[in-house]
Amino acid sequence: MGKRILVVDDEHHILELIQFNLEVNGFDVLTCDNGEDAVKISKEEEIDLIILDLMLPGINGIEVCKMIREKYHSDVPIIMLTAKGEERDKIQGLEIGADDYITKPFSIGELIARIKAVLRRTEDKSKINDKVIKVKNIVIDTEKHEVQRDNEILELTLKEFELLKMLALNRGKVLSRDVILDKIWGYEYYGDTRTVDVHIRHLRKKIGDTSGEFIETVRGVGYKMR
């Protein structure tokens, strides 16, 4: 599955146009037509990028962007989409946390190019910043060898820390028990996949993952970080 994009616009024909073309280009697309739903979806779903119209009913695009950045502290990339081409609107959007800005009418080719450019910048930035890995409200500091959830330090063993870091760095990717065993425990444990299951169980308990919010079991294969 490709990158997941949320498109927010109150003009349904534009929603349909963007959704169709993004899906043709391999993206997974969610849509909504108002600010309230945009905030809700961005909180509850794993989103890689948001295309956000400035002029929305209820909560406008500027307020949506502010809430995502300031209230929920999300750094999900945001491309502002608006019929307004005035310089002050562009500056305002960028100042409150938007990553890019495109005005209507626009070409689909330009929009796709902007999306890919923003995603590339985000991926490059994440590679640079992988000393501190964030997964929802869990923060993994690989230099300090420290894990926090809601600003509370969690006491993990060395293997639990390495296991959590490996899952977080491969977020969304299924890791087999054998791969985990080889990377963290080495060849001397080869074949003893129960070791992985036991450590996953202990790790889930320590990070408060009682309902599989963070670590998903993929039956017959292994585990992945949601």
Image (cartoon, grey):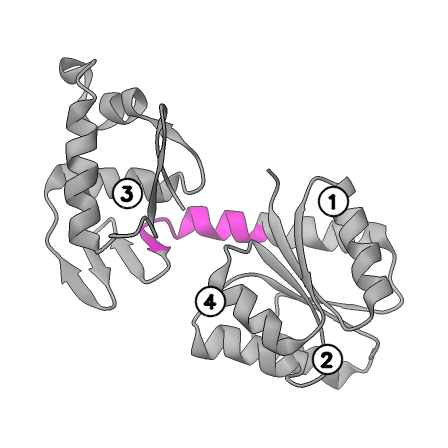
Rendered position, 210 above or below 105? above
Q: The disc labelled 2 sits on which kind of residue?
A: Leu
Query: What is the C-alpha distance between the residues marked 2 and 3?
Result: 39 Å
Rendered position, 66 above or below 101? below
Q: Residue at x 21, y 60 (%)?
A: 148
Which dot, 1 or 4, sits closer to the camera?
1
Query: What is the C-alpha distance between the residues marked 4 and 2?
Result: 20 Å
Q: Secondary structure at mark 4?
A: loop
Q: In the picture, which quadrant includes the N terminus?
A: top right
Q: Check whether the beta carbons of the residues at disc 2 and disc 3 lie within 8 A of each other.
A: no
* Whether residue 146 is visible: no
Dot placed on the residue nearer the N-terminal end, 2 or 3: 2
Q: Check whether the beta carbons of the residues at disc 4 and disc 2 lie within 8 A of each other.
A: no
Q: The disc labelled 4 sits on which kind of residue?
A: Ser
Residues shaded magenta? 121-134
* Whether residue 86 is visible: yes
Which dot, 4 or 2, sits closer to the camera?
2
Residue 123 falls left or right of residue 79: left
- Whole-percent x, y for residue 182 in the image: 25, 21
Which label sits on residue 56?
2
Residue 49 falls left or right of residue 19: left
Which class describes the residues within 10 Å of circle 2: few (<14), some (14-19), or many (20+)?
A: many
Which class describes the residues within 10 Å of circle 3: few (<14), some (14-19), or many (20+)?
A: many
Query: What is the C-alpha distance between the residues marked 3 and 4?
Result: 20 Å
Which label sits on residue 23?
1
Q: Tell me which corner region of the image, top left, top right, bottom left or bottom right, holds residue 157.
A: top left
Dot placed on the residue nearer the N-terminal end, 1 or 2: 1
Judging by the rendered image, the residue that carries numbered circle 3 is: 165
